[in-house]
Amino acid sequence: MDSFLLAIGSSCWLGILTSISPCPLATNVAAVSFIGKRVDRPSLVLASGIVYTIGRTLTYVGLGMLTVTSILSIPEVAMFLQQYMNKALGPVLIVVGMFLLGLFQFRLPGLSISQGLQRRVGERGLWGAGVLGLLFALSFCPVSAALYFGSLIPLAVEYESGVLMPTVYGIGTALPVVVFAALIASGARFVGALFNRLTQFEKWARRITGGIFILAGAYYVLTYLVGIQIW
């Protein structure tokens, strides 16, 4: 039970780390700009932030359910994972950790959301925030793809959680938008400064997380591949 709660907490942290990484942060800035247009109606600002979160979360849950269910529904794959999941997890964590530390880069073709499309979605009112969350969630960049497919999905497969963990992850990715929506609704004027602070925090959070991933990956490699019991 403790390990499952830790996995849930890790899913939330992966979502938060995704949300404050440069590429996803840019989409969240766009979302806040969209939501901030209703500054004269505080309740609508907050409602838009919540609907944006729901749209973003639904996308990650849908992808998570599809991926995890597809993997676990194939007997050969499920049996393979039962035997080799822990062995494969070590190298995966090390690779993701190295990427988070900036030791290598890769390009990823993703969905581009044009300004025109954002404007048309914005004209849809409250529900436009949900559509915007859904579209932005599909705009994977290398960091978000590494964290979602390289970290969250293996975690969800290990615990056979195709709904709960992606849901927690999705809420984590939209959390800054909800926070900023609440600040805008309350009339706070230091939103821009807080965004700048987030970019500084993200650098250290990403490096610390990358280091933890490498250490955890090394533990899995030594324990399940090499056969050395650390403790």
Image (tube, helix red, strand yellow):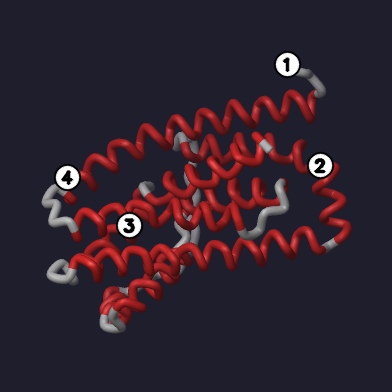
Density class for disc 3 (Cα within 10 Å; few <14, some 14-19, many ≥20) is: many
Q: Are marks 3 and 4 in contact (CB under 8 Å)?
A: no
From the image, tell me which residue sits under label 4: 193
Q: Amino acid at mark 3?
A: Val
From the image, tell me which residue sits under label 1: 231
Gap in angstroms between the C-alphas marked 2 and 1? 21 Å
At 53% from the left and 35% from the top, the residue drawn is: 98
Q: Secondary structure at mark 3?
A: helix
Q: Nearer the viewer, residue 165 or 120?
A: 165
Q: Position of residue 124 (x, y in %)?
A: 31, 83
Is residue 138 depicted above or below 152 in this figure?
Answer: below
At 67% from the left and 54% from the top, the residue drawn is: 161
At 27% from the left and 74% from the top, the residue drawn is: 115
Q: Are marks 2 and 4 in contact (CB under 8 Å)?
A: no
Q: Which mark is residue 74?
A: none
Q: Earlier in the sequence, mark 4 or mark 1?
A: 4
Q: Amino acid at mark 2?
A: Tyr
Gap in angstroms between the C-alphas marked 4 and 1? 45 Å
Is residue 12 depicted above or below 125 in this figure?
Answer: above
Name the mark nearer the viewer: 3 or 2: 3
Q: Are marks 4 and 1 in contact (CB under 8 Å)?
A: no
Q: Which mark is residue 84?
A: 2
Is residue 136 depicted above or below 171 in this figure?
Answer: below
Q: Earlier in the sequence, mark 3 or mark 2?
A: 2
Density class for disc 1 (Cα within 10 Å; few <14, some 14-19, many ≥20) is: few
At 30% from the left and 75% from the top, the residue drawn is: 118
From the image, tell me which residue sits under label 3: 178
Density class for disc 4 (Cα within 10 Å; few <14, some 14-19, many ≥20) is: few
Name the mark nearer the viewer: 3 or 4: 3
Gap in angstroms between the C-alphas marked 3 and 2? 39 Å
Q: Secondary structure at mark 2?
A: helix
Q: Is residue 152 visible?
A: yes
